[in-house]
Image (cartoon, grey):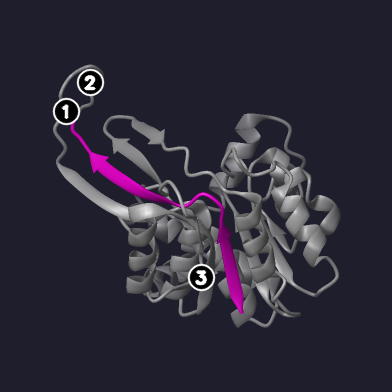
Amino acid sequence: MIYTVTFNPSLDYIVRLDNFTAGEINRVNYEQVLAGGKGINVSIVLKNLGHDNAALGFVAGFTGEEIKRQLKEFGVTSDFVQLDEGFSRINVKAKAKTETEINGQGPDISEAKQAELFAQLDKLVEGDTLVLAGSIPKTLPDDIYQRIMARLDGKGIRIVVDAEKKLLLNVLQYHPFLIKPNNHELGDMFGVKLTTDEEIITYAKKLQPKGKLINSVGAGDSMVAGFITGYMESNGDFETAFHWGVATGSASAFSENLATRPEVEALLKTIA
């Protein structure tokens, strides 16, 4: 079974405007409200690709109820720890000539509620996959990723970590199954040593299928979901998993919504 954890899920209010002027009234020409958070995006894309999974984490208030409702609509099972106070955060993503984001802070999470999540994770068994993704709210300890991986160490669980530098570096000692590649790993893929930003950009572009960028939100999360899908469906072939990751991330970037399997399979034909 695949599980995702989103520590600080959100409702994303996404708007498009011809122009945005600070201090003035701005009229939108497109708007959408979507459940968000890196783990949640991974869960939705995995389901789109045909793989059942369970979304874990913390939710609160009326926004938390909407997050759960949307996941159910996508066919994703959720088993969030319900917080007693506050509400899951609302993020505003305004897309005009440039993109502007205003992210909420999220509710407080007590030690007792953290213990409820740990109890859920203790039920994972050998062969399960766990995705730990995204930032953590200020009320959680900054070593929460490390605590979880230490707790599950040695149980035969594949753990994927998609997080900021400090959260990621602290868990490398536990040998996660997958992390986002850095510039050194990118160079290794092509047998070169990358030393400048320009070189990194050049080789990163070699991994990109052709297409028009429409929406970057969730593209990286989609890549994670695609990699997991490719790995599972190929019985552990990393090259296939890599191709699926690139195609799925690109499919989300080329669409208003998160990637679907037909979109991914179409792009696979151009890179595999």
Return the residue nearer the eye: 246 or 89. Answer: 89
Determine the CA span between mark 2 and mark 1.
7 Å
Secondary structure category for the residue under label 1: loop
Q: Can residue 113 be seen in this view?
A: yes
**Labelled disc at residue 21:** 2
What residue range appears in magenta?
1-18
**Labelled disc at residue 79:** 3
Circle 1 packing at 10 Å, graded few (<14), some (14-19), many (20+), is: few
Circle 2 packing at 10 Å, graded few (<14), some (14-19), many (20+), is: few
The three-letter code of the residue at mark 1 reads Asn
Residue found 59% across the figure and 37% down from its top: 138
The three-letter code of the residue at mark 2 reads Thr
Q: Earlier in the sequence, mark 2 or mark 3?
A: 2
Residue at the spot of label 1: 26
> How far from the left and from the top, in percent, is residue 257?
33, 58
Q: Can residue 183 be seen in this view?
A: no
The three-letter code of the residue at mark 3 reads Asp
Answer with left or right where residue 264 lies relative to residue 145: left
Residue found 57% across the figure and 65% down from its top: 4
Q: Is the magenta stretch mostly helix, strand or loop?
A: strand
Return the residue nearer the eye: 79 or 14. Answer: 79
Answer whether labels 2 and 1 touch (C-beta < 8 Å): yes
Determine the CA span between mark 3 and mark 1.
38 Å
Answer with left or right where residue 132 lies relative to residue 49: right
> How far from the left and from the top, in percent, is residue 234?
63, 81
Determine the CA span between mark 2 and mark 3.
41 Å
Residue found 74% across the figure and 64% down from its top: 177
